[in-house]
Amino acid sequence: MSEPNAAHWDGRRTVVTGGAGFLGRFVVRRLQALGADVSVPLSAEYDLRDADAFRAAVEGADTVIHLAARVGGIGFNRRNPAPLVYDNLAMTTNVFEQSRLAGVKKLVSACTVCAYPKVLATPFSEDDLWNGYPEETNAPYGLAKKMMLVLSDAYRRQYGFDSVVPIVANLYGPEDNFDLEDSHVIAAMIRKYVEARDHGGQVELWGTGSPSREFLYVDDAARALLLAAERLQTSDAINVGTGIETKIRDLASLIEELTGFTGETVWDPSRPDGQPTRFLDVSRARELFGFEAKVQLRDGLRETIASFEEAAQRA
């Protein structure tokens, strides 16, 4: 399995937008370990929806890794469709234009699996990305991020601007956001099972448990983005994930086992399931820049549960 090349990153001026976020922290740590000169524009100082602020954030960079996003789980998406599309679309347009104007040599702009159509044969192939509309609760976010692919292709053809847009599977791992209001499925489940184990009661989960997802460990994703920066030379969509399908009900059973919860799990079918099935064909990432996921789901979940328990003890 390929690893990033320290010689490529040593001293390289690299800006990571969203570098204080979940995936961003793992990307920054890897870059620092490789000797890169890393800067992280914080939202308190740089409103990346503003073109001038974005330009100031990336000025002088050789490489930009764009991870900043307005993002959340199904509940957050249902409550905030307008900010999701506006904020993400504004950042999407700014990152390409302002990086180009600033003379950035390589842009890696991370896209989301939510960009795929709602109903699609699995595993999802990059060739089918435009063959339908995304799942409705994800659409404002997914479509805003999907425009990265249009911009990457257009800017490569118009200006020769070197950018790549990997499509990243659902992430999980230590230091995730475990807030039940806007967390993703694994973080929310872990919190519910640990708290029910420690304080009693049943675990209530959204939907039927019948949909499936693909889950990529966060540090695997960070490694993939650095490999893409080094080796990927196309604006075509490229999937980044494990290629392994997991039913939500099976995920719940695994987290129940790993947390030691012995109570009852109750599913609420009045709550939305989201997209019925979602996992990726990841062969192109392996072929084009040598990425394969390392961390198995059981091992990654064990690390994530330990991270949540340690944080809860400190609180």
Image (cartoon, rainbow, N blue to C red):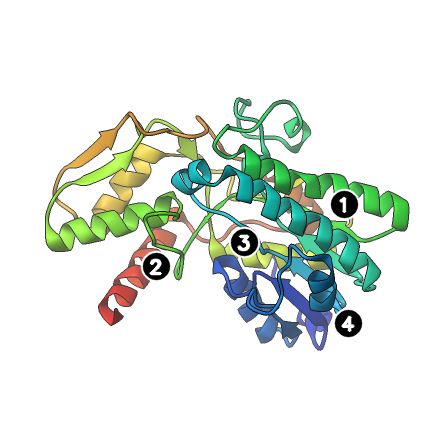
Q: Amino acid at mark 2?
A: Glu
Instruction: Decide if residue 315 is in sight here.
Output: yes
**Residue at the spot of label 4:** 60
Task: Name the secondary structure under disc 1.
Answer: helix
**Residue at the spot of label 2:** 303
The one of 268 and 190 positioned closer to us in this rendering: 268
Q: Dot 3: within a 10 Å radius of its alpha carbon, few (fewer than 14), some, or many (20 or more) residues?
A: many
Task: Name the secondary structure under disc 4.
Answer: loop
**Residue at the spot of label 1:** 152
Residue 221 numbered mark, or none: 3
Residue 198 coordinates in the image, percent (x, y) = 14, 55
Disc number lying in front (4 or 3):
4
Residue 171 coordinates in the image, percent (x, y) = 47, 49
57 above or below 111? below
Work out how far the residue at label 4 is from the one at label 2, CA to CA, in angstroms.
Answer: 37 Å
Work out how far the residue at label 3 is from the one at label 1, CA to CA, in angstroms.
Answer: 20 Å
